[in-house]
Image (spheres, rainbow, N blue to C red):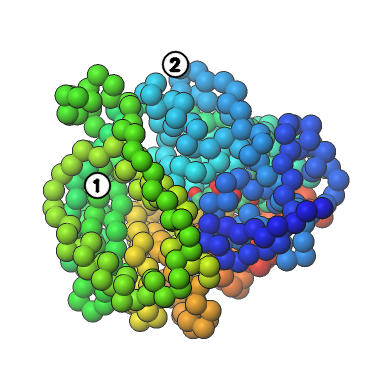
Amino acid sequence: MNTAPLSGWGRWPVISACKVAPKNEAEAIALLSDGEKLISRGLGRSYGDPALPSAEGGRVVDSLAMSRMESFDESTGALVAEGGVSLAEIIEAFLPRGWFLPTTPGTKFVTLGGAVAADVHGKNHHVDGTFGTHVTFFDLVVPGGQVLRCSPEKNSEIFAATIGGMGLTGHILRVGLRLRRVPSAWCKVRYMKAGNLEAMVHLLSEHDASYRHTVAWIDCLESGEALGRGILMLGNEAAVDELPPEHREHPHALPRRRKLSVPFDFPGWALNSLTVKAFNAIYYGLGRDCEKLVDFEKFFYPLDAISHWNRIYGKRGFIQYQVFFPDCSAVQGLRKTLDAISRSGLSSFLAVLKRCGPANTFPLSFLDTGFTLALDMPVVPEKLDVLMPELERILAEHNGRIYFAKDACAAPDLIPKMYPRLDEFRKVQRALDPRSVLRSHLSTRLGLI
Ligand SMILES: Cc1cc2nc3c(=O)[nH]c(=O)nc-3n(C[C@H](O)[C@H](O)[C@H](O)COP(=O)(O)OP(=O)(O)OC[C@H]3O[C@@H](n4cnc5c(N)ncnc54)[C@H](O)[C@@H]3O)c2cc1C
């Protein structure tokens, strides 16, 4: 068996693992029948260790060899595609025909299987909910090799546990998804500056009824009066008559641009609190209150324009810390989190705040009414060892929770409090997989199963 170093998008931790890529349903069934420890993997865009085998070993089921689109109903937007199909492939095929994803994470290099397993969310959570709420059914191979069709009506408990279940209930073979008609491939975006966290939270709450897509960039190295200052982006899909004349004939065509790439690992010192502070000051300083037409690619996927951007943190890698706080404790929780990070000097120029709408019915889904903050931090073990326990205390005091798809270093103790329906998930998982054949580095680290 050939093993190779494997990591998530944050490039930490790195685990030696053997990948196997079933090419069809029969091969996937055979793989899940032989009792070996496994965990599924899509495009590896989860940041930490959800798509890595557990510390006791096991193989990785690579879904990318099963990436066929199977059917599409032009009258309803109902798509059926295999779990290894990426969101990028769906956009490429259907945006020119006027259809887009019902919601999308900040990268399109994510598979359908990965999007369902993490129940990903986008900038429109307050309007459209999570990805899983637009899934009509999926076919799941469970340990032992049985294939179950799961939907809100059929095997409904397995359906709910799998959405957000981080690959621990089975391997998703195919997904039925409802795409959404869009008037064009452009958004009309209003940019507004907010001088501190309270102002930002107020603006996000005030505007979420009028805009489908909302997101804010936060300068997370600022402290004191300016803590949480940033730039808010509020977008609605643009109608054809709002486009410049040259784009009206083909309103769903995306402009072609040259892709940039980070060709090598940046040295560890390149990103430090001084360089990031300087970047943040310039970015904030250049921001203006204004309205612009922005194409989907630039609005939804700004980071996808630069391949291998994860190399800018150097070989040491980075973690992404994403937390959710409910409305009642959001300002306090966010303030303390930003303050702790700012004091730690762990530099992050990518900090994003989003408003979220009501929770769905899936037991391990991440979001509820409130706010979610996501930011990158370089892996500096001696600093993280001090910062992480402090962040966990803040989470505990403010009813916060972490996002499994981004996690690499949370401790297990708080997970049942963060996810009060964990036992409901475990009951379904145990019935499907009593020997815990499916396990990941994340699931053993956090004691999910
Ligand atoms: C730049 C960037 C921006 C992002 N923005 C967002 C965002 O805005 N919102 C958000 O919610 N997430 C966001 N993410 C995270 C990303 O959307 C999720 O981690 C997603 O799950 C990654 O999908 P993947 O195909 O890469 O899956 P992987 O990372 O390979 O796997 C993720 C999980 O899915 C499971 N899985 C994968 N395929 C299958 C399958 N076929 N069957 C069963 N389980 C499977 C794995 O076991 C694992 O637990 C972002 C990531 C990046 C890199």
Residue 264 in view of the camera: yes
Nearest the eye: 120 or 54 = 54
Residue 105 in percent (x, y) is at: 44, 46
Q: Residue at x 38, y 48 (%)?
A: 260
Kindly state the secondary structure of the residue where label 1 is placed.
strand
Nearest the eye: 329 or 192 = 192
Kindly state the secondary structure of the residue where label 2 is placed.
loop
Residue wearing tag 2 = 75
The residue most toward the right is 34
Q: Which corner quadrant of the image does residue 203 belong to? A: bottom left
Rate crowding at label 1 as few (under 14), some (14 to 19) or many (20 or more) other CA atoms within 10 Å: many
In the rendered image of this protein, does residue 235 appear above or below residue 372? Answer: above
Q: In the picture, which quadrant includes the C terminus?
A: bottom right
Q: Residue at x 43, y 42 (%)?
A: 104
Q: Which corner quadrant of the image does residue 346 belong to? A: bottom left
Residue 368 in percent (x, y) is at: 43, 54
Precedes in sequence: disc 2 or disc 1: 2
Decide if ligand 1 comes within 8 Å of the CB at mark 2.
Answer: no
Numbered-mark total: 2
Q: Amino acid at mark 1?
A: Leu
Residue wearing tag 1 = 234
